[in-house]
Image: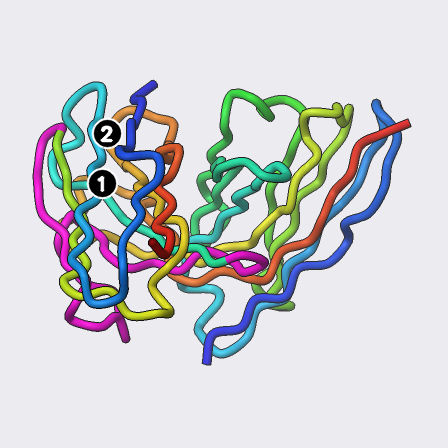
Amino acid sequence: EVQLLESGGGLVQPGGSLRLSCAASGFAFGSNAMNWVRQAPGKGLEWVSGISHSSGSTYYADSVKGRFTISRDNSKNTLYLQMISLRAEDTAVYYCAKDQPSSQPFGVGIYYFGHWGRGTLVTVSS
Amino acid sequence: EIVLTQSPATLSLSPGERATLSCRASQSVNNYLAWYQQKPGQAPRLLIYDASNRATGIPARFSGSGSGTDFTLIISSLEPEDFAVYYCQQRSSSWPLSFGGGTKVEIK
């Protein structure tokens, strides 16, 4: 069974930093692209960042580019999201999500989100 | 950036009824569209990908159709556990990925 367990969320002041982790089990972590998706309180879903299986390619939403860094350690089956210069608008539940490839891919990269963790809440407030 | 517009915002139906949800893209995404279900306090769950492929374990009462800019999710006969919020998501050749704003299916 695929399991994704996020950790590292909490309360941080504007301008502060935080590192999220996602521990994965139940599948071949090193063979799958991974993502972070967030959801502000009472709002919809926003894709944040993705990373290829080998870390060779990383992808970011414009809203976090230059402030967030996605990485992974395949030896530890763990995905990370380093967040700096945090803003109030970054307040959200952050989900780790395993990529679901397309059945007819037109190229490499992230497609869909096949399995999700339960999320970790990040609150940016003074 | 491709914008996905979901309609209606809220759908009020009774168990056993048919639900029809719409997702319209601001430009063509071919068939690279997915649907997710989210219940309160839970993570989203993938239902449909590539517009019409059911994800593993998803009941046959869920079906997706469409291509280009217009897509539909149909729940043929609503079960009590189907009352939730549904999101569409696109993966076209132009970044970034994006989600629609959601449709809430509520009990009438």
| Residue position marked by numbered label 1 in the rendering | A107
Image mark 2: chain: B
Q: Are marks 1 and 2 in contact (CB under 8 Å)?
A: yes
The reply to whether the magenta stretch includes residue B51 is yes
Horizontal side of residue A79 vs B100, given as left or right: right
Task: Look at 75% across and 23% down and name the residue there.
Answer: A87
Q: Which mark is residue B93?
A: 2
Task: Look at 35% across and 26% down and name the residue there.
Answer: B95
Closer to us: mark 1 or mark 2?
Answer: 2
* Residue A93 drawn above or below residue A21: above
Range drawn in magenta: B40-69
Image mark 1: chain: A
Q: Residues within 10 Å of mark 1 (few under 14, many from 20)?
A: few
Task: Look at 52% across and 44% down and name the residue there.
Answer: A37
Q: Quadrant of the C terminus of chain A?
A: top right
- Which color scheme is applied? rainbow
Q: Of A77 and B65, which appears nearest the observer?
A: B65
Q: Quadrant of residue A79?
A: bottom right
**What's under tag 2, amino acid-wise?**
Ser
Q: Quadrant of residue B26?
A: top left
User: What secondary structure is found at the residue carrying circle 1?
Assistant: loop
Residue B105, how many percent across, how many down?
34, 50
Residue A69, how many percent across, how many down?
64, 36
Q: Residues within 10 Å of mark 2 (few under 14, many from 20)?
A: some
Horizontal side of residue B33 vs B104, given as left or right: left
Q: Which mark is residue A39?
A: none
**What's under tag 1, amino acid-wise?**
Gly
Residue A58, how many percent across, how many down?
48, 37
* Residue B55 drawn above or below residue B49: below
